[in-house]
C-alpha cells in the first residue's frame, strides 16, 4: 500500500510548484552530512561490522513514509503532500543505494553496479513515486472513481501500519 501513498500524493501535486532546485540541493546536502557523520561515528561505538551495518541503516533509513508524511499531512493538509512525497521519492533510491553499498563494503564484498541498479529499480516506493511523476508529466488522468479508490487505500496505510506495529509489541519483557 505504501506505493499507493507515493503515487496518490504526487498525482495530486503541481510538480512545477514543488520542484524547487535550491530546496532539493539543500536536502541532498543535509543527507550527505548525516550519512557522512553516521559512517564516521557508528564504528567508534560499535565494533562488530554486523552491528555497524544495522545501526547505519537505522539512522539513514528512517521511517519517513510512516511518520513524516502523516505529520506533514496533519500540519499542512493532505492537499499539500506533494513536496514531501516528491522528496521521499527522490531520497528512497538514494538511501537504497547508500545502504546497499554500505552493507557490501562492511561485508567485504565487491560492489557490482547492475545488481544494485536492479534492486533500486524494483523498490515499490520508487515505482509508486515514478508512476505518479509519469502520470503528472504526461498529463494522464485517472477516472475519478479509480482515483478515489487509490486515495482511500493510500489513506489506510498509516493507521494500518501503526496498528500492526502495536500488535507486534510485547509488554511482558
Image (cartoon, helix red, strand yellow):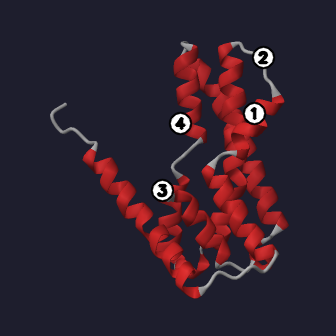
Asked whether the residues under the numbered discs 3 and 1 touch, taking CB atoms below 8 Å apart as contact, a structural biologist would say: no
Q: Which residue is mark 2?
A: 110
Q: Secondary structure at mark 3?
A: helix
Q: Which mark is residue 116?
A: 1
160 or 94, nearer to the observer: 160
x and y percentages locating residue 160 in the rendered image: 36, 59
* Residue visible at 72% across and 28% down in the picture: 101
The residues bearing labels 4 and 2 have C-alpha atoms spaced at a distance of: 23 Å
Q: Nearer the viewer, mark 3 or mark 1?
A: 1
Say which residue label 4 marks: 58
Whether the residues at callouts 2 and 1 have beta carbons within 8 Å, the answer is no
Q: Locate residue 139: give its quadrant.
A: bottom right
Q: Which mark is residue 66?
A: 3
Q: Earlier in the sequence, mark 3 or mark 1?
A: 3
Q: CA distance from mark 2 to mark 1?
A: 11 Å
Element class at badge 4: helix
The mark that comes first in sequence, 2 or 1, is: 2
CA distance separating discs 3 and 4? 14 Å
Q: Secondary structure at mark 2?
A: loop
Amino acid at each position: 500500500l505504501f506505493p499507493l501513498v507515493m503515487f496518490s500524493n504526487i498525482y495530486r501535486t503541481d510538480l512545477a510548484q514543488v520542484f524547487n532546485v535550491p530546496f532539493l540541493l539543500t536536502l541532498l546536502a543535509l543527507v550527505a552530512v548525516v550519512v557522512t557523520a553516521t559512517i564516521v561515528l557508528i564504528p567508534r561505538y560499535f565494533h562488530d561490522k554486523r552491528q555497524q551495518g544495522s545501526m547505519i541503516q537505522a539512522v539513514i533509513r528512517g521511517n519517513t513514509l510512516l511518520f513524516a508524511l502523516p505529520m506533514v499531512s496533519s500540519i499542512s493538509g493532505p492537499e499539500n503532500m506533494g513536496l514531501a512525497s516528491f522528496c521521499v521519492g527522490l531520497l528512497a533510491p538514494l538511501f537504497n543505494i547508500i545502504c546497499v553499498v554500505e552493507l557490501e563494503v562492511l561485508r567485504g564484498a565487491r560492489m557490482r553496479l547492475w545488481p544494485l541498479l536492479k534492486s533500486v529499480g524494483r523498490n515499490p516506493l520508487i515505482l509508486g513515486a515514478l508512476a505518479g511523476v509519469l502520470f503528472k508529466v504526461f498529463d494522464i488522468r485517472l477516472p475519478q472513481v479509480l482515483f478515489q479508490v487509490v486515495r482511500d487505500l493510500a489513506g489506510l496505510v498509516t493507521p494500518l501500519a501503526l496498528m500492526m506495529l502495536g500488535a507486534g509489541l510485547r509488554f511482558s519483557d
